[in-house]
Image (spheres, rainbow, N blue to C red):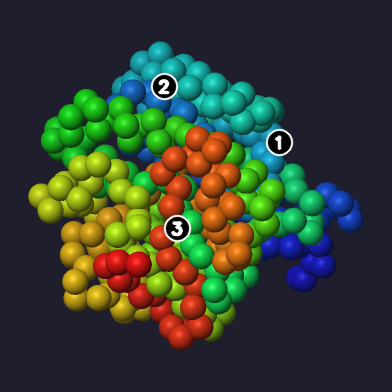
Amino acid sequence: MDDPNLIVGLERADDAGVYKLSEDLALIQTVDFFTPIVDDPHSFGQIAVANALSDVYAMGGQPLTAMNIVCFPIKTMDLSVLREILKGGLEKMKEAGLTLVGGHSIEDAELKYGLSVTGTIHPSRVVTNVGAHAGDRLILTKPLGTGIINTAIKGGMAKKESITMVTDYMTRLNKTASETMQEIGVHACTDVTGFGLLGHAFEMIQGTGKGMVFHCSSVPLFPGALDFAEMGLVPGGTYRNREFRIHQVDIDPAVSPFLMDILFDPQTSGGLLIAVPGEKTEKMLRRLHEKGIDEAAIIGEVVNDLRERIGVMPKD
């Protein structure tokens, strides 16, 4: 059944649903939860909340309320673990100005945690993952490589400094980046998560007749991510992402296959990929840097001459 108030629904792979309530108010709705990717339960709670909120930020909205989703192995794990997860999550919700209004928990053999989130936005200011124009520049707001580094952590190969660094980035909200893109005015946005940079980028051009070109030398990477990729410390999700999209990607022969692993690497609580009008790009980048998002970088552009394909080049 068609609903004229449904602004964003199931018609394409966008980051959240958007429903118009009035001429000046729409709701953004999303849900996300997953198994632990770090050992520290407090950090896991923070990461899970930051990851769930990212869908609302990618739409340009303001998170309003949330409900906890918990699957917990009560017979094999101490409740103190759950308390720390919820404590970490609540701290991140307070940072976002979010109100926790309830939740649901079940007993499960595998621990999982996340949120359902409701946000708000003006109907005319919704930013979707389509709408990019040829000539738009592409800005990425966080480095890539969380999946590969987390694999190295699980294999006991990552140093304490790497663990601290990647955890810190995964707990960072995309709030400031979202507010900045609304301030400047952009054409499209998505957050980079499980499908990797190239997977989510393709969702931005699917069905549009446009293409994208990425310049590898400009893509921010976590220190050590390339070394770990060369060692074969690559998660299974990377291979699945590559298999699904590789036939739609044109790769320059000079681009390292290990760098391609990072471009397909599934991210957890990754940054925003934003299509910015060319004349606003430098202003957008400058504002992001002024607000502390130092790693934000221009990594490519939207083009007309690659119809629903992505080109990967070694340099700008």
Element type where label 1 sits in the image: strand
Please give the name of the residue rendered at 40% of the width and 13% of the height, measured from the top-left corner.
80
The tag on residue 42 is 2
Percent from the top left, x then y, of residue 12? 58, 69
Task: Give the amino acid at mark 2.
Answer: His
The answer to which quarter of the image holds residue 130 is bottom right
Question: Going by the picture, which residue comes out furthest to the top?
Answer: 80
Q: Along the line of sight, which residue is nearer the eye, 169 or 56? A: 169
At label 2, counting other C-alpha atoms closer than 10 Å, the crowd grade (few under 14, some 14-19, many 20 or more) is: many
Q: Is residue 238 visible?
A: no
> x%, y% of residue 222?
29, 43
CB of mark 3 within 8 Å of CB of mark 1?
Answer: no
Among numbered discs 2 and 3, the one appearing first in the sequence: 2
Q: Which residue is mark 3?
A: 298
Q: Secondary structure at mark 3?
A: strand
- Mark 1, residue position: 64
Query: Sequence order check: which comes first, mark 1 or mark 2?
Result: 2
User: If you read the primary sequence from the N terminus, does the residue marked by circle 3 or circle 1 appear first?
Assistant: 1
Picture layout, residue 184 above or below residue 150: below
Is label 3 or label 1 in front?
A: 3
Q: Residue at x 35, y 50 (%)?
A: 220
Category of crowding for the residue at label 1, using alpha-carbon neighbours closer than 10 angstroms: few (below 14), some (14–19), many (at least 20): some
Residue 149, image x, y percentages: 25, 42
Residue displayed at 24% across by 55% down: 236
